Image (tube, rainbow, N blue to C red):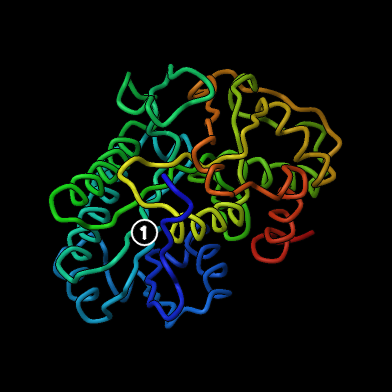
């Protein structure tokens, strides 16, 4: 790995697949500050990436120089647990179709975005990139994780066989503007922000948090991931994926307390231990991506405040 392996984005046509989601939106906003030739986007109504013919026709038509694959079916622990086939199929098809289309159309670079849930449930902490495929996965998100592992391996094998310059980032838990606040399918950060807001508005005495509150999680603001993506596009080439995180984790109970402080809910936190905890801990070793010169800039409390402002402006029915 060398920071000297530069890919010049100037004048390039870059397709951000999945630009409407939280990750794709952040990367699109960050790339808009670059001297690109064109920032290419398409909605799911314009091209269904689960369909091979549609995906190949789109890529052949727009001919991007580089692709950032941010499109994915994502969800929180309950959605992942109860809809494993959907998460496996959709994400498998999206990755396979985009990578194959990139190869067929001579795309110069492809950036694949994974998730830290690909690592074994009992992986040594902090988790190094080499921990991949060394043990059983967390059962509650196995379908999603297998799809992301397959996408990672697909990029690797296309690099080896076809010379496709596919690189992969493995971000930790993400949050920020354009997050999903659906009560059923949201991730923990968005779910707790919504719960705290609704509890404050209702004047509730208590707020229920799923699980024991003891699992530890690492959180990264999506704008920091967007910066890491641009750094990787410019400066990294290689088949091994790079972890992207902040290098610090917090207990879920600590996260909930911080969210309540930002939102202004002063009631009691109650933990529903009948609900699943998921992995006991998930902290990434970010040594390798740091060697490229990238560091996260947004603190947890600052990031939560930013996410809550977006929630108030775009989701909340009342303040």
Residue displayed at 24% across by 73% down = 59
Q: Is residue 290 visible?
A: yes
Q: Farthest residue to the front: give it.
A: 4
Position of 138 relative to 47 (above/below)? above
With respect to residue 29, does 254 lie above or below?
above
Residue 20 picture location, percent across and down: 47, 67
Give the tally of numbered discs.
1
Q: Residues within 10 Å of mark 1 (few under 14, many from 20)?
A: many
Q: Residue at x 53, y 53 (%)?
A: 228
- Is 20 displayed left or right of 215 in the figure? left
In the rendered structure, the answer to whether residue 182 lies left or right of residue 134 reads right
Q: Nearer the viewer, residue 270 or 189?
A: 189
- The image position of residue 251, as x and y in percent, is 67, 25
Residue 206 relative to residue 275: left or right:
right
The quadrant where residue 69 appears: bottom left
> Which residue is drawn at the image coordinates 45% and 36% (left, top)?
116
Q: Quadrant of residue 108?
A: bottom left
Task: Report x, y in % for residue 81.
Answer: 38, 33
Q: Position of residue 286 (x, y in %)?
A: 54, 36
Can you say whether 31 is above or below 214 in the image?
below
Residue at 44% from the left image edge and 77% from the top image edge: 39
Q: Where's the C terminus, which quadrant?
A: bottom right
Observer able to see residue 275: no
Residue 170, quarter of the rendered image: top left
Name the residue beneath numbered marker 1: 69
């Amino acid at each position: 790995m060398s920071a000297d392996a530069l890919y010049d984005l100037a004048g390039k046509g870059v397709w951000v697949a999945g630009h409407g989601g939280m990750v794709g939106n952040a990367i699109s906003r960050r790339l808009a500050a670059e001297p690109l030739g064109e920032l290419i986007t398409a909605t799911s109504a314009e091209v269904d990436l689960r369909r091979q013919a549609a995906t190949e026709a789109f890529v052949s038509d727009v001919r991007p120089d580089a692709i950032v694959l941010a499109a994915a079916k994502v969800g929180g622990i309950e959605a992942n647990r109860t809809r494993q086939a959907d998460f496996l199929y959709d994400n498998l098809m999206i990755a396979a179709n985009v990578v194959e289309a990139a190869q067929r159309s001579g795309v110069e670079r492809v950036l694949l975005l994974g998730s830290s849930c690909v690592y074994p449930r009992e992986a040594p902490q902090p988790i190094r990139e080499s921990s991949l495929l060394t043990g059983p996965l967390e059962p509650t998100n196995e379908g999603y994780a297998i799809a992301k592992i397959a996408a990672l391996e697909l990029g690797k094998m296309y690099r080896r066989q076809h010379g496709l310059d596919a690189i992969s980032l493995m971000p930790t838990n993400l949050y920020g503007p354009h997050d999903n606040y659906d009560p059923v399918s949201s991730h923990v950060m968005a779910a707790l922000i919504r719960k705290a807001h609704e509890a404050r508005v209702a004047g509730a005495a208590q707020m229920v948090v799923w699980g024991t509150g003891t699992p530890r999680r690492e959180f990264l603001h999506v704008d920091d991931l967007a910066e890491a993506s641009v750094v990787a596009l410019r400066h990294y080439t290689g088949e091994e994926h790079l972890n992207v995180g902040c290098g610090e984790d917090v207990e879920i109970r600590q996260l909930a307390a911080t969210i309540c402080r930002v939102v202004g809910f002063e009631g009691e936190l109650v933990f529903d231990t009948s609900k699943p905890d998921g992995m006991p801990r998930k902290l990434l070793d970010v040594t390798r991506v740091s060697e490229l010169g990238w560091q996260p800039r947004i603190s947890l409390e600052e990031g939560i405040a930013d996410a809550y402002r977006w929630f108030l402006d775009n989701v909340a029915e009342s303040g």
